[in-house]
């Protein structure tokens, strides 16, 4: 947990710059959050409408579990409510949402869930190489309650990810760094599945 919003802003801006350099936060897309308080649940989330590669530590806003804020200036992402739902249900300390292409392409091929198995990189996702892991896929919606319900319906404590069809992917962890490592490994895993499916 990162209790100070300024410290959270520095960490969020740095992570956004990293993902932008990877091509996963094109334009102003994507959003990241960290939990700053549990009772009641509050999150620092990146602001809406800004190039994520150019964020400063001030470009975050504190929201409640529903994604609402009292901040008169900073506007949170419309998806902040889903971040809150994921943090509340999973107990995560950080949620990352990016528009990496491989998970979205995978969801086109496997809309009922993307199965990953017999891959050493699963260890980086918190699983064993011999295990079968199914990443849930939810239909896209502009209504965060609908997406939140879809997330919760498919939630498994040992699968810290959700692909939103034709949109992007959410991955979470205890902190931003665990979430990052899980996301990087997941992107590799689904990229492998997509690439080998073409053969």
Image: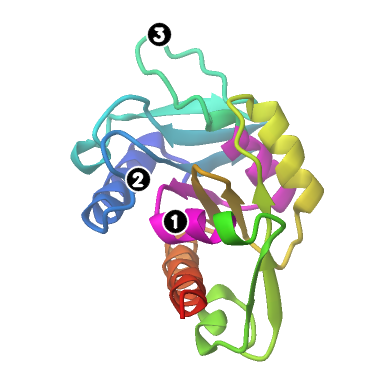
**Mark number displayed over residue 176:** 1
Horizontal side of 111 relative to 176 (left or right) equals right
Image-quadrant location for residue 50: top left
Q: Residue at x 21, y 43 (%)?
A: 53
Q: Which one is earlier in the sequence, the residue at label 1 or at label 2?
A: 2
Q: Which one is earlier in the sequence, the residue at label 3 or at label 1?
A: 3
Query: Residue lying farthest right?
Result: 153
List the residue tagged with mark 2: 12
Q: Secondary structure at mark 2?
A: helix
Magenta segment: does it hold 157? Answer: no
- Mark 1 vs 2: CB contact within 8 A: yes
Number of numbered callouts drawn: 3
- Spatial CA distance of label 3 from label 2 is 21 Å
Q: Is residue 70 above or below residue 198?
A: above
- Mark 3 vs 1: CB contact within 8 A: no
Specify how the rendered protein is coloured: rainbow
- Spatial CA distance of label 1 from label 2 is 8 Å
Point out residue 185 in the picture as x, y percentages from the top left corner: 46, 72
From the viewer's side, name the closer residue of 22 and 140: 140
From the viewer's side, name the closer residue of 11 and 143: 143
**Mark number displayed over residue 3:** none
Residue 39 shows in the view: no
Point out residue 36 in the picture as x, y percentages from the top left corner: 52, 40
Q: Residue at x 47, y 80 (%)?
A: 196
């Amino acid at each position: 947990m990162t209790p100070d919003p300024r410290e959270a802003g520095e960490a969020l801006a740095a992570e956004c710059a990293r993902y932008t350099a990877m091509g996963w936060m094109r334009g102003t897309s994507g959003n990241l959050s960290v939990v700053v308080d549990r009772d009641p649940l509050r999150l620092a989330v990146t602001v809406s409408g800004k190039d994520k590669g150019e964020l400063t530590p001030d470009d975050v806003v504190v929201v409640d579990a529903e994604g609402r804020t009292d901040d008169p200036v900073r506007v949170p992402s419309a998806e902040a409510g889903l971040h809150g739902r994921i943090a509340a249900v999973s107990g995560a300390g950080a949620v990352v949402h990016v528009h990496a292409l491989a998970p979205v392409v995978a969801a086109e091929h496997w809309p009922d869930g993307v199965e990953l198995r017999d891959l050493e990189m699963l260890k980086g996702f918190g699983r064993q190489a011999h295990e079968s892991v199914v990443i849930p896929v939810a239909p896209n919606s502009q209504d965060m309650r609908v997406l939140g319900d879809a997330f919760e319906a498919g939630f498994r404590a040992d699968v810290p990810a959700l692909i939103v069809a034709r949109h992007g992917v959410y991955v979470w962890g205890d902190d931003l760094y665990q979430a990052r490592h899980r996301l990087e490994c997941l992107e590799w895993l689904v990229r492998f599945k997509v690439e080998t499916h073409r053969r």
